[in-house]
Image (cartoon, rainbow, N blue to C red):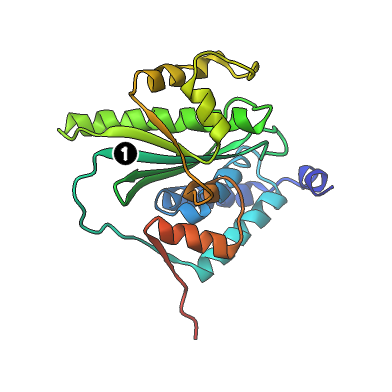
């Protein structure tokens, strides 16, 4: 019922639509360094073409959150040169209620240092959780190879490791062919070849997966925990 009400929400006036798009783009720029509202910005961006009053209400919720949490500090402590890039990925099955597409969250680490976080809708519609988690692994693997190539260009040799909390997705990436996953798009099967050639290592990461906050709304304690684990620290806004 809530989804139907949002679909019937009136469109914004030209002035309000311009204001909406401007502020969403500003939030998108800031979210490159703030994983705590990466998924929110991804959702807000879906209303850019024809923003409605419901979209504006969501944007105001983000503004109220930022009043309470205006600062984030990414801490880069001194560390030995890491031997691998670690990309933690997660997926939320059929998160988008309109298209039924799933959301992929990704956190890229160079040692203890967070270098990039993203939240994106998957281009393919996954029919089950294993399929969605497999697409997330592909997303992490592709970006890991890209970061590896960049580091190689500046003389830094590293391996690529992708971590997921889905053992079934890891099993799918570690074999050859579709197996029981008959509906996985074949253009994503290149990951299996890369894993077989040991270009990418896939590992299971337990429940402590920081990329979870980039796939869906989570409770404040969960958000704080993952942001702290990621060497990212929130400082509450000081009020009189």
Name the residue nearer the viewer: 30 or 89: 89
At a point 31% along the width and 38% down the height, the residue shown is 85
1 in relation to 149, above or below: below
Q: Secondary structure at mark 1?
A: strand
Q: Residues within 10 Å of mark 1 (few under 14, many from 20)?
A: many
Q: Is residue 135 visible?
A: no
* Residue drawn at (41%, 16%) of the image: 193
- Give the side of residue 224 with respect to residue 232, left or right: right
Count of number-bearing discs: 1
Where is residue 166 shown, x and y percent of the image? Answer: 55, 37
Q: Which residue is mark 1?
A: 85
> In the image as oriented, which residue stretches furthest toward the right?
1
Residue farthest toward the left in the current orientation of the protein: 155
Report x, y in % for residue 35: 46, 52
Toward the viewer: 231 or 238?
231
Using residue 24 as the reference point, say whether residue 158 is left or right of it: left
Residue 124 lies in quadrant: top right
Q: Residue drawn 67% across and 30% down?
A: 128
Taking 239 as reference, is 137 above or below it?
A: above
Q: Left or right of 205: which side holds 183?
A: right
Q: Is residue 149 above or below residue 88?
A: above
Q: Residue at x 19, y 29 (%)?
A: 153
Residue 208 horizontal/vertical position (percent): 50, 52
Q: Is any part of residue 210 visible from this angle?
A: yes
Quarter of the image for residue 185 reads top right
Seen from the viewer's position, the closer of residues 111 and 203 is 203
């Amino acid at each position: 019922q809530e989804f139907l009400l949002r679909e019937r929400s009136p469109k914004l006036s030209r002035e309000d639509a311009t204001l909406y798009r401007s502020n969403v783009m500003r939030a998108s720029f800031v979210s490159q360094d703030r994983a705590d509202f990466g998924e929110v910005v991804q959702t807000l961006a879906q209303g850019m073409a024809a923003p409605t009053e419901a979209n504006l209400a969501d944007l105001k919720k983000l503004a109220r959150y930022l009043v309470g949490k205006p600062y984030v500090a990414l801490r880069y402590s001194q560390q030995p040169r890491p031997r691998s890039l670690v990309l933690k990925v997660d997926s939320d099955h059929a998160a988008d209620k309109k298209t039924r597409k799933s959301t992929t969250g990704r956190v890229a680490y160079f040692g203890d240092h967070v270098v990039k976080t993203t939240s994106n809708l998957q281009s393919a519609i996954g029919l089950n959780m294993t399929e969605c988690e497999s697409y997330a692994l592909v997303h992490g693997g592709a970006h890991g190879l890209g970061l590896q190539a960049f580091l190689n260009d500046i003389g830094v040799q590293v391996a690529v490791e992708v971590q997921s909390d889905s053992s079934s997705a890891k099993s799918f990436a570690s074999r050859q062919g579709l197996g029981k996953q008959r509906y996985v798009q074949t253009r994503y099967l290149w990951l299996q070849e890369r894993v077989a050639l040991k270009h990418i290592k896939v590992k299971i990461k337990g429940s402590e997966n920081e990329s979870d906050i980039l796939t869906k709304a989570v409770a404040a304690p969960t958000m704080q925990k993952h942001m702290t684990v990621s060497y990212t620290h929130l400082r509450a806004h000081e009020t009189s």
